[in-house]
Amino acid sequence: MHEVMRLVGRSLSPETVLREMLHLMSELLGLNRGRIVLREPESTQASIQHAYGLTAAECQRGQYALGEGITGRVLASGQAAIVQDIDHEPLFLFRSVQRAELPPETVAFIALPITANGQTLGVLACHRLRSRQRHLNDDLALLRVLATLAGQLLQLQQLVSEQTRQLEARNTQLARALQTQAARYGLIGSSPALLQALGELEQVSQASVSVLLLGESGTGKELFARAVHLASGRRDQPFIKVNCAAIPETLFESELFGHEKGAFTGAVAARPGWFEQADGGTLFLDEVGELPLGLQSKLLRTLQEGTLVRLGGRREQRVDVRLVAATHRDLSADVQAGRFRQDLYYRLNVIPIRLPSLRERREDIQALALHFVSRANQAHQRNVNLTPEALQALAQQDWPGNIRELGNFIERLVLLSGHSSVSQAQLLRLLRQSQSGAQADNTPALAPARAWPGRPADDAAPAPLVRDYQSTHAHPVAQLQEALQRHHGNQSRAAQSLGLTLRQFAYRLRKAGLR
């Protein structure tokens, strides 16, 4: 026992301690061919994992099912077994060592369970010659102590292995997070589709021509627009972003071009518009397809001549602005339908860059998820991380809302998770709850799981194009009427329930002939 404890003091590695313990059993006690049989994880099979006095081939043959032979019975019952004479025991298998290779004397076999936390992890077994002068009870007492020590060492190994696995997974996540922090212009990912879009962006960044960003909603158009600005010589000048879908039609001209004092009721002072505020820098017009037709001609004039006139003013002002526009609509179809000026479309479409959807860059989902987890942890003072299996599950999902939907889901996951480490099963369960909640909220089938219950309307799914809306909905008029009735005539709430902006909803009402 003194020698065994000296081994434990030098190393807690089961491989080192257990093999030397079996060696000492043979050399000092004459308990020969000692072996430790351990159960395979998530299996009913067991095999020899540590041994002394057995060849590699003999250890390889030492495979046992629960209840099979003496070793299998000890493993299944958790009770010790003593065979006084293996030649007269029909259950003894002679599986590892044949009888002819053993001494001709009477050979006994002792097998004791190795337990931890009330569970049988394995079996400590050995051969013993009956002719030994030492009493059998003395050997049994010592073997029980050694079996207990072996169980504690194996339990410690399991705990250390689990902690090591979690730390390695956490380190991997942190390493990926550090890689994402070094992403160009704040754009996270390294997929070919993203790199192609970035390459096109950098090629035209130094020019002053207009850039049109195309792609589905939620693909990060604002970040790309800012990247165009940062990659250009205007990086130290203002970057102004304007969401055209969020400005009431009556305020468009005043917001973009400014107004003079007294230009309209409530104009108590002159105010520069977004173009003037972006002078020398970059102006980003998001959802440019929502611009009213009357304002499109004035925008075209400003882009062509580099001058503007404030609302209510008479003096032209020169501005130097690099325009970046973005839309999820098909502007060429809007031009044919008369909803968008052809000459303005050509002016904006000088450099079109298509942004890839998340379905086209699945290899970036894990990096994006880690970024959103880190951001949500900092914002909400949490310490939540995702297991590698959970990250793989995220990468296998379809995200119709793209990066915006993924970010919203991760934030919800961090807030609702009751565990510091989120497993794959926990993630999928919350994902199903979110999707079922969105369906219960009458979210359109075109955008499943985009608008989480309780999220702001800005996080909701974008409305489909008019032509898509009419072709994918069997009864668009009935659906509009039903939404109005459900919300007692409140157009804002009816529009939100269908994933539309108020302007888009009003347009569909007019198109359907409803008042």
Image: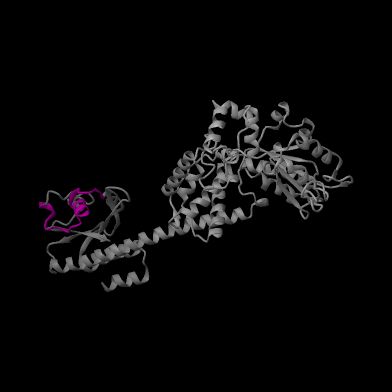
Q: In screen coordinates, is 147 left or right of 209?
A: left
Q: Which residue lies furthest to the left in this view?
A: 88
Q: In screen coordinates, is 478 left or right of 6?
A: right
436 or 210, which is in the foreground?
A: 436
Labels in figure, total: 0
The picture places residue 219, in percent across and down from the top left corner, at 62, 42
Q: In the image, which residues are magenta?
A: 62-88
Quadrant in which the N terminus appears: bottom left
Q: Which residue lies furthest to the right in this view?
A: 315
Looking at the image, what colour scheme do you see? one colour
Q: Does the magenta stretch include residue 24?
A: no
29 or 48, which is in the foreground?
A: 48
The picture places residue 311, in percent across and down from the top left corner, at 82, 44
481 or 115, which is in the foreground?
A: 481
The picture places residue 347, in percent across and down from the top left corner, at 79, 36
Q: In screen coordinates, is 162 left or right of 125?
A: right
The picture places residue 399, in percent across and down from the top left corner, at 54, 40
Q: In screen coordinates, is 248 left or right of 147?
A: right
109 or 140, which is in the foreground?
A: 140
Quadrant in which the C terminus appears: top right
Judge whether 462 appears above or below 478 on screen: below
Judge whether 347 appears above or below 368 on screen: above
Judge whether 119 appears above or below 193 on screen: below
Q: Is residue 68 magenta?
A: yes
- At horizontal 56% and vertical 31% (from top left) the residue drawn is 481
